[in-house]
Image (cartoon, rainbow, N blue to C red):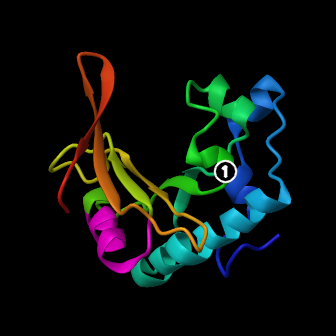
Amino acid sequence: MDLSDNFTLAELTKSQTAVRKGIRNEPSTEHINNLIHLARTILQPVREYFDEPVMISSGYRSPELCEAIGSSAKSQHAKGEAADFEIPGIDNKELATWIVANTEFDQLILEFYIENDPNSGWVHCSVKTPPEEGRKQILQAKKIEGKTVYEPILL
């Protein structure tokens, strides 16, 4: 099923962990509608602007899958509202900065990015389904003494 011109339901629900652990990772109709909104609001504009394939590392995750990977069952991934992605060859900070300036996002996290290492980390971005407005929250995730810490950043 196509969610937008360049994104499919299969790529936004694919999970090696789910396959390995035998976890069903099938979104409901509501989740699919949220994924369509995510694809059309964030992913497709990114694809069109950078004119390069967007590599999705995580999209929809069922609550069971979220817990299996150490995330929360209340994650926006479990609602079909979030994706983790990058574009090979594009600095993740540049990607994040473009999203902040040009899309209607809810939360953007520049995850485990290391300054001057354009291949480090990835971008997590979420949306709220209208009529809810996004928080426009911009964070950076990093490891400090073995724990993930989220801090506000300016892009």
Q: Is 100 within the magenta?
A: yes
For label 1, the crowd category at 10 Å Cα-Cα, with few meaning under 14, some 14 to 19 and many 20 or more, is: many
The single residue placed furthest to the top in the displayed view is 145
- Residue 86 or residue 102, whichever sits in front: 102
Residue 63 left/right relative to 42 = right
The quadrant of the image that shows the C terminus is: bottom left
- Residue 68 or residue 5, whichever sits in front: 68
- Residue 131 or residue 70, whichever sits in front: 131
Q: Is 88 within the magenta?
A: no
For badge 1, the amino acid type reads: Lys
* Residue 5: % across, % down: 67, 82
Residue extent of the magenta highlight: 94-105
* Residue 112: % across, % down: 31, 39
Q: Which residue is mark 1?
A: 79
Residue 39 left/right relative to 113 = right
Which residue is pictured at 83% across the width and 47% down the height? 26
The quadrant of the image that shows the N terminus is: bottom right
Which residue is pictured at 55% across the width and 54% down the height? 83
Give the total of numbered labels: 1
Q: Main secondary structure of the magenta part?
A: helix
Residue 63 left/right relative to 77 = right
Q: As displayed, is residue 110 above or below residue 48?
A: above
* Residue 27: % across, % down: 80, 51
* Residue 43: % across, % down: 53, 70
